[in-house]
Image (cartoon, helix red, strand yellow):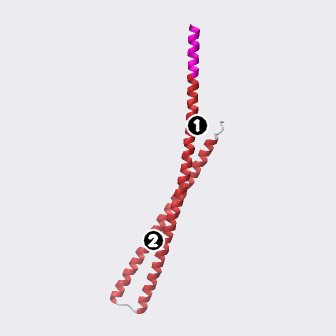
Amino acid sequence: MATKSPITTLIEIAETDTDEAAKKLGKTIRYHEETIAKLNLLVQYRDDYDLKFREAASKGITASQYGNFMSFLEKLDAAVDGQKLVVAEALRRVDVAKKEWQVCEKKRLSYNTLDNRIKQEIQNKELKRDQKQTDDFAARAYFYKS
C-alpha cells in the first residue's frame, strides 16, 4: 500500500474544512432567511392590527379600548424592532461564515495548485529522463552500426 504524501493529507484536511464551512454557511443562510420570514410575519400582523384599530376607531371606541390598542401596537412595534436586530445579527453571522468558507476554499485551492505543480514537475522530469534514455539508445545504436 502506497503511503500518502503530506500534500495529499493537507488537501484532504482542507477539503474536510471547506465542506464543514460550507455546511455552516448553509445553516446560517437558512437561519437568516427564517429570521426575515418571522420579521415579515410580524410586520404583516402589526399592519393588520393597525388596520383593525383604525377601523374600530372610525366607528368609535372607548378610551380604555384606545389604550389597549395603543399598548398592543407598541408591543408589536417593539417586537418588530427586536426582530430587526435578530435579522441584522443573522446577516452578520452569514458574513462571518462566508468569510470562513472563503478562507478554507482559498487554502484548499492553494494546496491543489501546489500539488498540480509538484505532479507537473515530476512528469517533466520523467519526460526528460525518457528522452535522455531514447537519445542514449539512439546514440548507441548509431555507434554500433558505424
Element at label 2: helix
For residue 42, what is the image quadrant? bottom left
Element at label 1: helix
Q: Which residues are magenta?
A: 132-146
For residue 128, what is the image quadrant? top right
Q: Position of residue 12 (x, y in %)?
A: 60, 46
Residue type for callout 2: Leu
Q: Which mark is residue 39?
A: 2
Q: Position of residue 27 (x, y in %)?
A: 52, 60
- Does the magenta run of residues contain 133? yes
Residue at the spot 46% in from the left edge and 75% down from the top edge = 80
Q: Which mark is residue 118?
A: 1
Residue at the spot 42% in from the left edge and 74% down from the top edge = 43
Quadrant of the drawing holding the N terminus = top right
Residue type for callout 1: Ile
Quadrant of the drawing holding the C terminus = top right
